[in-house]
Structure formats: structure tokens, C-alpha cells
Image (spheres, rainbow, N blue to C red):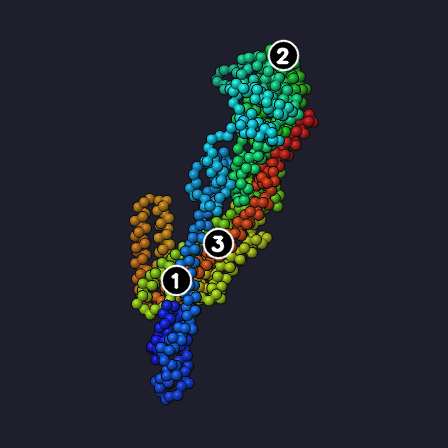
């Protein structure tokens, strides 16, 4: 039954219709005031006491004017706040979530392209997810430069331009190694390089290969046919003599270097400073680009030296053949000392094996078994570091790497020299956990955005069912305390608890490899997602429920509300989830699913429309609940985007800077991955010691 003061309360609050929530709030206060006044008024009947209370209240017009004047500023402020919530907060949250998720896809694309580049498949193909202006990475910047300057650089002109600088010898060495041997001025250019670095054997070995290419063909260079006996072929004895002279001249020089790593150092100085994972992977990619023609030329020269030994011995020049055989250690020492990457070192080992084995066979042919045995023993010691790594990793070591190493550790360098310590592997392992958490945060943002849009859609259904009912706001403006309570319990507490628990020793599982502990890490992220969604809905629903009761809006009791939630939720949330699932399926499956999608959308809408009409008496409450949930989700999106994303980016930068195994740091002069540099240095030390001791 309506109160006798209902009409009066409606009259005096008529000036507040622009703010329905405020009007209902003031109306409830006026009704409470009038009912209290009626209890203490003079009169023998309820009607007389009500009339006395109304008379004492004052003229409705005057009271309405006073209420309007008293609440004018409050109404203006609330109007701006409502406009901000409806027109700015929700669109901003959607834009932020979409931008961050898009940026995640763009970054993941760059990482994939950089990893592809590690396999030698670098490409300047256009990006499927072009980076936004504030997302520019070193990799994308490099691709843009490549597309802007597709023509190859004239390396000799570059040397001419910088020939007065200390690095000019590096630039000329790069040019010399790439120079085709059919050039008429090849010999003159090599002499220019030799004048720049008189003590570097590089140009003598290049000239030796140049002369011997025209002088002879070694049997190991030929493809053997069935029933055919291969033999060394001599084309020009004079050119072979020149080639041998250059080779021996090179072995007598102090060092050998093709400056490939020095050139890479100069190259990376021109690139943007690496910041994120894809930038560091890109640096590893460009540092893995090897001049394979030059490496092939080294192996060809080694084969030809063996052929020259046999040709000299067959021609009666035994002493000259022995000189070549004796020089194998110096040649192997040069290539080993000049090798700065694992691939260069493996080529040096292959070349040394070719020349040393040919030398041992020559000693055998001359009856010098002692020299042959010494050569083979020295070669075995020289090969020892590589032979040790050819064996399968012991099960204990594999379990150790699987438990504590990062996923990229065996991919980046399968040949470990010394197993890294747990502390050394920690930054790369933490980086992978950060990447997983970044993906989890983006899925959370996507889910919250979907929930935001879904609540707006459901609110529209309830609005259609309640439009003939008493006016009520479909967007409640909670106090800052109520909003802080919802965000605190719904977002801050679950996210803070996750951060604290996942960083604790043992409990946090971050000391383990992501593959080893992956299911638990993913389960933790799903638990975080579910808790945030549940807590946001639970505390927001409690806030809206209490507020609607204050505004005299009909709300179901607990038992009825649970029943309605199951029925309406089954139709609304599950139905719309099926629609979204079909929409995703149509992208990757057959086109006829679009018809199923449309049918599912129409059917879900009809069923939910029937449910809202059947619950028309609660339409105000449920419409207000769903409409008021949207800004809660929007605040959660902006809060997570403004805290979790910067925190994860900063953690990613710190992990990359702290990594001393897989991440090269150009600003520290590092070109190779540190674990590769360490392995190469250790191998070289053992191999050079083997050459010196025997």
C-alpha cells in the first residue's frame, strides 16, 4: 500500500527528475521525515496526524524550490560524473584493452619473426600486425630501414669514405671476404688489404685460395662415381706454386682474423638500443648471420692443401710436401684463434682435421710413422672439446636443465661446455614466467572487456522490459568508499595476493622451468582470472542490491535471486558465450557456420527477452545491476592496464638486463650470446693448448 505522503514526495522532488537516483534518495528521506512527523503530530486518527504532518511540512512548491536550490551543485556534479562514466570511462577502457592486446599480438609477431631469423630466414615481409607509433621495436625499425634502402651497400666505397679511421681495416676485410674471385683486380685488392694489416694472414689465405682454385682440383672436391678412382688434377704448376707460397706466408704471420665479429660490433652501434625481448632476440638474429661463402672457401682451401701435398709428393718434391705437412699446426692455430663464434670454430676444427689427416697420411707414405702418430695424437687432443659434446647429455644434466633452465637455453645453444648454475639461469627463466603472466593479463583484459560489453547488452534487455515502470536510474553512482571496496576486494586483493604468492620461494614455483611447472603456473593464472571476475561481480552486486533497497526498488530475496541467476544466467551468459564461440569458429572453419551463428544469436535474444518480460517486476533491479557493473569492469580494466602492464614491462627489462647467458648486451661490447662466447673461449683454450703441447 502506498504511503499517504507518496503524492507529496513526488511533487516536491519533481525538480530533481534530471537525476533519478538523487530524486529517489531525497524522496526516501522526505517520506521517512513525514512518517516520523506524523507519529508525533496531534490528532486522533492516522488521517488527522498525516494531515498535520503535511501542513507542518510547508507548501510543495516552496519545498521543491528549496530542494532544487540545495541540490543544484550536487546535481551538476553528478551529471558530469554520469557523463564521464557513460561517455568516457567505458569507451576508454575498451580502447585501452584493445590497444594493449593488439600490442601483445604485434610484439608476439616480432618475437616469432626474430626466432625465425635465428634459423637464417630473415625477411623484410610486411607485418600482419603493424606496430603502433609507441610500440616501435628494433626489429621493426630495422625492417623499415631495409625496405627504405633495399640496394646492397657498396662496401669498398664505404671503406674509402672511412679509410682514415681506426676501424678502416675492419671495413676492408669485410669487402675483401665478399669480393668475387673472378674480378681482374682481385690480387691487387688483396695486396691493398695486406698493406693495411701486414701481420694478418687473412689476405694470404684468400690469395692462396684464389691461385689454387685455378691451379688444381683436389680429389676430395670431386664427386665420386661408381667404379671411378678419384685423383688430384693439376692445371697450372706455376699457379699452384704461387698458392702454396701464399699459404705458407700466411702460416708464418702472427695472427689471422676476418674481422666478422668486429664488423658486427660496428653494425649494432647503428641500431636502436635494445629494450624488450624481441629487440634482444633481433640482436641475436643479426649476430647469427654468418658469411657462409667465406666459411666454405676456408674448407675448400684445406682440401686443396691436402691435394697439393699429394701432387708435390707424386712429382718428386718430398721436402716441399713435408713443409706443407709441418705447417698444419700453425694453420689450425690461426683458424682457432681467429674463430669468435661457434660456427667459425666448428669450421676451424673441420679444416684442421682435413689438413692434419692428409699430413698424417703423407708421413705414413714416407715411412715416418713417429710423425704420423704425433700428428694423430695432437689432432685427437685438438678434437677433444668437440668430441665431448658429441656425446648425449647425461640424464642428470637433462633433468637439471629441464627443471631450472629456460626454454630457450637448449634451443639457443645445444653444445654446453659447462652447465650453467641455477643463479645464472634464473633471469631467463623469470623472463619466461613474465611472458606467461603478460599473456594472462591480456586474457584477463579481453575477458573483462567481453563482460563489460555483455553487461551493457543484458542491461538493454532489462531496460526494454522496465520502460513502462516507475523511473529509476540504470546507472548507480556509488560513493568512493563503495567503489574502493568493490575494486579493493575484486581486483587489488586477488592481484596482490597472486603477486606475493608467486614470488615466494618454493610456493611461487618461479625457480623452476616453465615446462616443468607449466600446468601449475597456468592453473594459477586461471584461478586469478576466475577470482577477479567472481569478486568483482559479487561485491558490485552487493553494492547495487543495498542501494536499490535504499531507493525502494523491488529486489528478490536471496533464494529467489539464486534461482533467477541460474535461469537467466543459463540463457544470457551461457547463450552469449555460445554465440562468441561460434563467431570464433566461423573464422577458422567453414562459412556455413555463419548461418548457425545468426540463428544462435536470434534464439538467445528471444529466450532472454522472454525471461526479462517474465521478471518484469524485478527488471529495475537487474537492469540497474548489469548497467552498474559496466563501469566497475571499466575501472578494473584501466587499473590493471595502468599497474600490471607497466610492472610486467619493467620486470621484463630487468630480467633481460640481468641475464648473463642468452642475452647479448651491445652496450657492453657483447655481440654473441654470453653462453656461446663462454663456450667458444673454453674450447679455444683447450684446442690451442693441444697444439702447443704436442
| Residue 110 higher or lower than 507, as above or below | above
Res. 197 visible in picture:
yes
Kindly identify the residue that appears in the image at 31 percent across and 64 percent down: 465
Res. 201 visible in picture:
no
**Numbered tag placed on residue 317 in the rendering:** 2
Front-most of residues 327 and 484:
484
Mark 1, Cα crowd under 10 Å, few <14 / some 14-19 / many 20+, is: many
**Numbered tag placed on residue 387 in the rendering:** none
Q: Work out whether mark 2 precedes mark 1 in sequence or the reverse, and give the earlier one.
A: 2
**Image side of residue 233 versus residue 91, left or right:** right
The quarter in which the N terminus is drawn is bottom left
**Disc 3 and disc 1 in contact, CB within 8 angstroms:** no
Can you give x and y, in whole percent of width and height, for residue 140 in the image? 48, 40
**Numbered tag placed on residue 641 in the rendering:** 3
Q: Work out whether mark 3 precedes mark 2 in sequence or the reverse, and give the earlier one.
A: 2
Helix, strand or loop at label 2? It is loop
Kindly identify the residue that appears in the image at 49 percent across and 63 percent down: 484
Mark 2, Cα crowd under 10 Å, few <14 / some 14-19 / many 20+, is: few
**Numbered tag placed on residue 627 in the rendering:** 1
Mark 3, Cα crowd under 10 Å, few <14 / some 14-19 / many 20+, is: some
Amino acid at each position: 500500500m502506498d504511503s499517504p505522503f507518496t503524492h507529496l514526495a513526488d511533487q516536491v522532488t519533481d525538480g530533481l527528475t534530471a537525476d533519478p537516483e538523487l530524486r529517489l534518495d531525497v524522496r526516501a528521506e522526505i517520506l521517512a521525515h513525514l512518517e516520523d512527523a506524523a507519529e508525533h503530530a496531534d490528532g486522533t486518527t492516522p488521517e488527522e496526524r498525516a494531515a498535520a504532518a503535511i501542513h507542518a511540512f510547508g507548501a510543495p512548491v516552496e519545498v521543491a524550490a528549496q530542494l532544487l536550490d540545495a541540490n543544484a551543485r550536487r546535481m551538476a556534479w553528478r551529471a558530469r560524473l554520469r557523463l564521464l562514466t557513460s561517455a568516457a570511462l567505458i569507451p576508454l577502457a575498451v580502447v585501452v584493452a584493445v590497444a594493449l592486446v593488439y600490442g601483445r599480438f604485434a610484439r608476439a609477431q616480432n618475437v616469432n619473426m626474430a626466432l625465425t631469423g635465428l634459423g637464417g630466414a630473415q625477411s623484410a615481409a610486411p607485418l600482419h600486425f603493424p606496430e603502433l607509433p609507441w610500440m616501435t621495436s628494433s626489429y621493426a625499425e630495422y625492417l623499415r630501414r631495409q625496405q627504405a634502402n633495399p640496394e646492397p651497400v657498396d662496401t669498398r666505397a664505404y671503406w674509402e669514405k672511412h679509410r682514415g679511421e681506426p676501424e678502416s681495416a675492419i671495413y676492408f676485410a669485410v669487402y675483401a671476404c665478399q669480393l668475387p674471385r673472378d674480378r681482374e683486380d682481385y690480387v691487387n685488392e688483396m695486396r691493398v688489404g695486406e698493406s693495411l694489416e701486414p701481420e694478418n694472414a687473412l689476405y694470404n689465405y684468400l690469395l692462396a685460395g684464389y691461385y689454387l682454385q685455378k691451379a688444381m682440383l683436389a680429389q676430395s672436391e670431386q664427386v665420386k662415381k661408381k667404379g671411378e678412382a678419384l685423383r688430384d688434377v693439376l692445371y697450372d704448376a706455376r699457379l699452384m706454386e704461387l698458392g702454396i707460397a701464399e699459404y705458407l706466408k700466411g702460416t708464418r704471420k702472427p695472427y689471422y682474423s676476418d674481422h666478422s665479429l668486429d664488423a658486427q660490433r660496428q653494425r649494432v652501434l647503428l641500431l636502436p638500443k635494445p629494450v624488450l625481448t624481441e629487440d634482444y632476440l633481433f640482436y641475436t638474429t643479426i649476430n647469427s648471420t654468418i658469411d657462409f661463402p667465406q666459411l666454405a672457401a676456408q674448407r675448400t682451401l684445406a682440401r686443396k692443401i691436402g691435394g697439393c701435398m699429394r701432387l708435390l709428393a707424386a712429382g718428386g718434391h718430398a721436402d716441399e710436401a713435408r713443409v706443407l705437412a709441418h705447417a698444419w699446426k700453425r694453420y689450425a692455430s690461426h683458424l682457432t684463434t681467429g674463430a669468435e663464434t661457434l660456427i667459425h670454430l666448428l669450421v676451424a676444427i673441420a679444416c684442421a682435421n682435413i689438413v692434419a689427416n692428409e699430413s698424417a697420411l703423407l708421413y705414413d707414405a714416407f715411412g715416418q710413422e713417429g710423425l704420423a702418430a704425433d700428428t694423430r695424437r695432437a689432432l685427437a687432443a685438438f678434437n677433444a672439446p668437440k668430441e665431448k659434446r658429441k656425446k648425449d647429455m647425461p640424464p642428470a644434466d637433462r633433468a637439471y636443465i629441464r627443471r631450472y633452465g629456460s626454454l630457450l637455453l637448449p634451443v639457443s645453444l645445444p653444445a654446453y661446455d659447462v652447465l650453467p648454475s641455477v643463479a645464472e639461469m634464473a633471469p631467463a627463466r623469470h623472463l619466461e614466467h613474465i611472458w606467461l603472466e603478460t599473456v594472462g593479463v591480456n586474457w584477463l583484459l579481453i575477458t573483462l572487456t567481453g563482460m563489460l560489453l555483455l553487461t551493457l547488452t543484458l542491461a538493454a534487455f532489462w531496460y526494454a522490459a522496465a520502460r513502462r515502470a516507475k523511473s529509476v536510474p540504470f546507472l548507480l553512482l556509488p560513493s568512493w568508499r563503495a567503489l574502493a571496496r568493490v575494486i579493493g576486494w575484486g581486483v587489488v586483493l586477488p592481484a596482490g595476493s597472486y603477486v606475493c604468492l608467486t614470488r615466494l620461494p618454493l610456493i611461487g614455483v618461479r625457480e623452476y622451468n616453465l615446462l616443468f611447472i607449466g600446468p601449475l603456473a597456468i592453473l594459477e593464472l586461471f584461478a586469478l582470472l576466475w577470482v577477479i571476475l567472481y569478486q568483482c561481480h559479487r561485491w558490485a552486486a552487493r553494492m547495487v542490491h543495498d542501494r536499490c533497497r535504499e531507493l525502494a526498488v523491488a529486489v528478490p530475496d536471496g533464494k529467489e535471486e539464486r534461482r533467477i541467476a541460474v535461469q537467466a544466467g543459463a540463457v544470457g551468459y551461457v547463450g552469449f558465450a555460445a554465440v562468441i564461440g561460434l563467431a570464433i569458429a566461423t573464422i577458422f572453419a567453414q562459412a556455413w557456420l555463419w548461418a548457425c551463428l545468426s540463428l544462435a544469436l536470434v534464439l538467445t535474444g528471444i529466450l532472454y527477452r522472454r525471461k526479462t518480460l517474465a521478471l518484469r517486476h524485478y527488471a529495475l533491479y537487474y537492469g540497474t545491476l548489469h548497467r552498474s557493473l559496466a563501469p566497475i569492469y571499466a575501472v578494473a580494466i584501466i587499473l590493471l592496464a595502468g599497474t600490471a602492464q607497466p610492472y610486467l614491462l619493467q620486470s621484463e627489462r630487468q630480467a633481460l638486463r640481468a641475464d648473463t647467458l642468452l642475452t647479448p648486451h651491445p652496450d657492453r661490447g657483447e655481440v654473441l650470446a654470453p653462453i656461446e662466447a663462454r663456450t667458444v673461449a673454453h674450447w679455444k683454450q683447450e684446442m690451442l693448448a693441444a697444439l702447443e703441447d704436442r
